[in-house]
Amino acid sequence: MSIALQAAKDGREAPPIARKTSYVAMRRKSYVVWQMNISQVQRQIMLLLADGMDLVTALSKLARFSEAESLTANIRAWFKDWIEEGLFRGVEVR
């Protein structure tokens, strides 16, 4: 959780925040908002999947713009985290 968001939740004044591009995945469960900081590549994967693209096609598309070795090295850990945090309701195998 970001320092500024935690300060707001705790009723404290938020520290000054430097402007920078960042990406966050958010969800709500039982009226509790949860957030996870994600990278630009993680965001792209999530957007492609949300648009209905299958995982293999999404990864192939991203491999053109990202280092394929880095992508394949991290994808399992990312999905493990996303599944544990409840970002996916299920997996459909075709």
Image: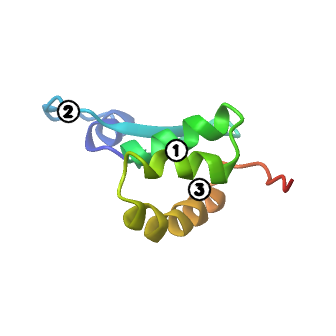
Display colour scheme: rainbow
Mark number, residue 14:
none
Residue at screen point 65% across, 54% down: 56
Which residue carries the number 2 mark? 20
Q: Nearer the viewer, residue 9 or 50?
A: 50
Number of numbered callouts drawn:
3
Of labels 1 and 2, earlier in sequence is: 2
Q: CA distance from mark 1 to mark 2?
A: 26 Å
Q: Quadrant of residue 82?
A: bottom right
Horizontal relation, residue 91 to residue 14: left or right? right
Q: Is residue 64 left or right of residue 91?
A: left
The picture places residue 88, in percent across and down from the top left corner, at 70, 49
Few, some or many residues within 10 Å of mark 2 (<14, 14–19, 20+): few
Give the x, y percent position of residue 51. 66, 31
Give residue 71's quadrant in the image: bottom left
Q: Which residue is mark 1?
A: 61
Q: Earlier in the sequence, mark 3 or mark 1?
A: 1
Residue at point 27% right, 44% down? 3
Q: Residue at x 26, y 35 (%)?
A: 12
Of badges 1 and 2, the one in the foreground is 1
- In terms of secondary structure, where does tag 3 sit? helix
Q: How far from the left and from the top, in percent, is residue 43? A: 47, 41
Relative side of 20 to 68, left or right = left
Is disc 1 placed on a helix, strand or loop? helix
| Residue type at the position of mark 3 | Trp
Q: Of the numbered discs in the image, which one, if any, rests on residue 82?
A: 3
For the residues carrying marks 3 and 1, which lies nearer the camera in this image? 1
CA–CA distance in space, label 3 to label 2: 24 Å
Q: What SS does tag 2 mark?
A: loop
**Whole-number angstrom distance, CA of label 3 to CA of label 1:** 20 Å
